[in-house]
Amino acid sequence: MNINGYKLVMIHDENDQNVVGEYLQNLYEKSKLSPKAKLHLMFLNSAFNLLSVQTLESLINKRTELTITLNGEQRTKHYHLVKPLRLIPIYELRYAMNGNEHLRFLFFPFQHRRQHYYVFVKCFIKMRTPRIDETDKMRNLTFEMYKRVKKNPEYYLEGN
């Protein structure tokens, strides 16, 4: 990894569940049979790769273009990839599954032993119809995990 890069880690939450890792593993398993799941996984992989090499500021302040190639066909999405969640230092990585379902990954930046991390804690689907939005609840739970990581970074970050 380059010197300015960020290491993305998924940690166990307050219920000792790796919610983000389990979601991505499940999507990976689905992608073996479902072209739609494969498409989502490829876009998410592209988003995570971009996050690992660009600053949060550059991603927050502009629309991001993600382009993938699936079965020889290029697909592009343009949107705000990262959004701060009004509780420093919590952010969401945003991804639209379709017009109604919007996947959110909640994380925070963290520095430990000269390594920069983006620590992912929660993921959930926000829906327009019926209106389901757990953003504030998940943001607050992610903030509680931020405080735990701050108290004991070795436990959460070393060995990942």
Image (cartoon, helix red, strand yellow):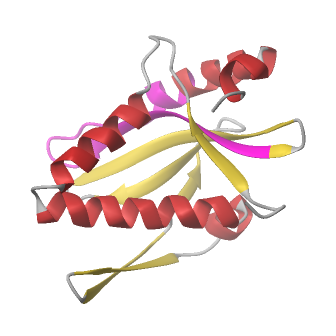
Foreground residue, 77 or 160? Answer: 160
> Where does residue 3 sit, x and y in percent of width and height?
84, 61
> Where does residue 21 sit, x and y in percent of width and height?
42, 35
Task: Identify the residue at image location x=68%, y=65%.
Answer: 53
State the quadrant of the C terminus: top right
Q: Quadrant of residue 71?
A: bottom left
Tell me: 105 left or right of 61: left
Task: Identify the residue at image location x=40%, y=59%.
Answer: 44
Tell me: 60 left or right of 35: right
Residue 97, above or below 122: below
Residue 134 visible, this orientation: no
Q: Quadrant of residue 135?
A: top left
- Asked whether 134 falls inside the magenta stretch, the response is yes
Tell me: 55 left or right of 44: right
> Where does residue 80 sit, x and y in percent of width and height?
50, 67
Looking at the image, the residue that sits furthest to the top is 15
> Where does residue 14 sit, x and y in percent of width and height?
51, 12
Residue 111, above or below 159: below
- Asked whether 104 falls inside the magenta stretch, the response is no
Foreground residue, 67 or 97? Answer: 67
Task: Identify the residue at image location x=56%, y=54%.
Answer: 83
Residue 150, above or below 97: above
The boundaries of the magenta stretch are: 116-140
Looking at the image, the residue that sits furthest to the left is 33
Q: Quadrant of residue 123?
A: top left
Task: Identify the residue at image location x=56%, y=27%.
Answer: 142
